[in-house]
Amino acid sequence: MSAADSTGSASIFPYKLIATDLDGTLLSSGDTISRRTREALAAATAAGAKHLVVTGRPVSLTRDVLDGLGYRGLAVCGQGAQVYDAAEHRLLTSVTLDRQIAGLALAKIEAEVGPLLLAAGRDGLDGEVLVGPGYRVHEGPVSYQPIKDAAELWSAPLNKVYLQHPTLGDDELAEAARQAAGGLVGVTMAGQGIVELLPLGLSKATGLSLAARRLGVKAKDTIAFGDMPNDLAMFAWAARGVAMANAHDELKAVADEITLSNEEDGIAVVLERLLGQRFSRRG
């Protein structure tokens, strides 16, 4: 994304950092960004702000999307576990999930709710997503590696474990997991059918604060955009949190502002207002 302001004006932007989630927030259908949103971000960066992607996706499922968008900045991936330099295609930091603790947490959760359907993300730039029997994958450009034996999930370092339940909904499963194992692991809901176990204490705010420090920016100078409960910590860290119209009710409840949906250029609407400008609605 170019940092050039297509209007040529020298607008003043009130924040030094714009932190945006990807799915359901910055991206519209087909993992794309509309022209209007691109132009609004370009004008904000030309006015002195930096744009930082903060996503629950691990680097292995993020880098191709960022390359396709022409994004060359830092990105916080894996719910805060990874800080990635998109320009150099280099992983700067990475936090892994202790597999022994994760196994104990799963045992405690299953003791309460019964057998779970599992997947796991391996650590690293090329970390595969291993999918156990019965786990329902989401359609899209993400590649998964099916496995027949759940024991294979534990054969290499992981950044997260994904949970599904045959009958419980996402919110119910996440709450049950917190009650059973919240003292061992972090639990978050990142999207439909995506309940995750993470290293205890890890959140998007963890990686966001590290990346912001590298950029020389503080929380008080940050505006954040998101749509799911995994964005709660990011909103708590940033000076202002903006939830999309399509956001989960839990995030809307703590947001400073609710904008239009990701399909309706909700990020652009806010940035344009802060810049005092209007841009093309095409694309």
Image (tube, rainbow, N blue to C red):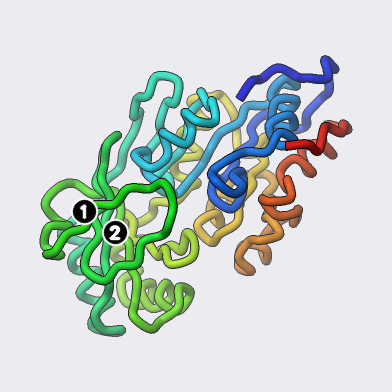
Compared to 104, does 126 lie above or below? above
x%, y% of residue 8? 82, 15
- Amino acid, disc 1: Asp
Q: How far across and down, in percent of the image, does residue 236 sit?
A: 59, 52
Which callout, 2 or 1, points to the residue nearer the camera? 2
Of the 4 image quadrants, the one containing the N terminus is: top right
Residue drawn at 68 percent across, 38 percent down: 34
Label total for image: 2
Instruction: Tell me if label 2 and label 1 are in contact, CB under 8 Å.
Output: no
Q: Is residue 266 left or right of residue 275?
A: left
The residue under label 1 is 98
- Answer left or right for 191 relative to 217: left
Q: Could you give the CA–CA distance between mark 2 and mark 1, rounded to whole angstroms?
A: 11 Å
Residue at 38% in and 78% down: 176
Q: Position of residue 49 (x, y in %)?
A: 68, 26
Which amino acid does the dot numbered 2 rest on?
Val
Q: Secondary structure at mark 2?
A: strand
Compared with 135, 225 (above or below) is above
State the SS at label 1: loop
Task: Name the residue located 42 percent from the left edge and 44 percent from the top edge.
Answer: 80
Specify the quadrant of the image occupied by residue 185: bottom left
Callout 2: few (<14), some (14-19), or many (20+) C-alpha neighbours within 10 Å?
Answer: many
- Disc 2 target residue: 161
Q: Nearer the viewer, residue 270 or 133?
A: 133
Looking at the image, tell me whether mark 2 or mark 1 is earlier in sequence order. Answer: 1
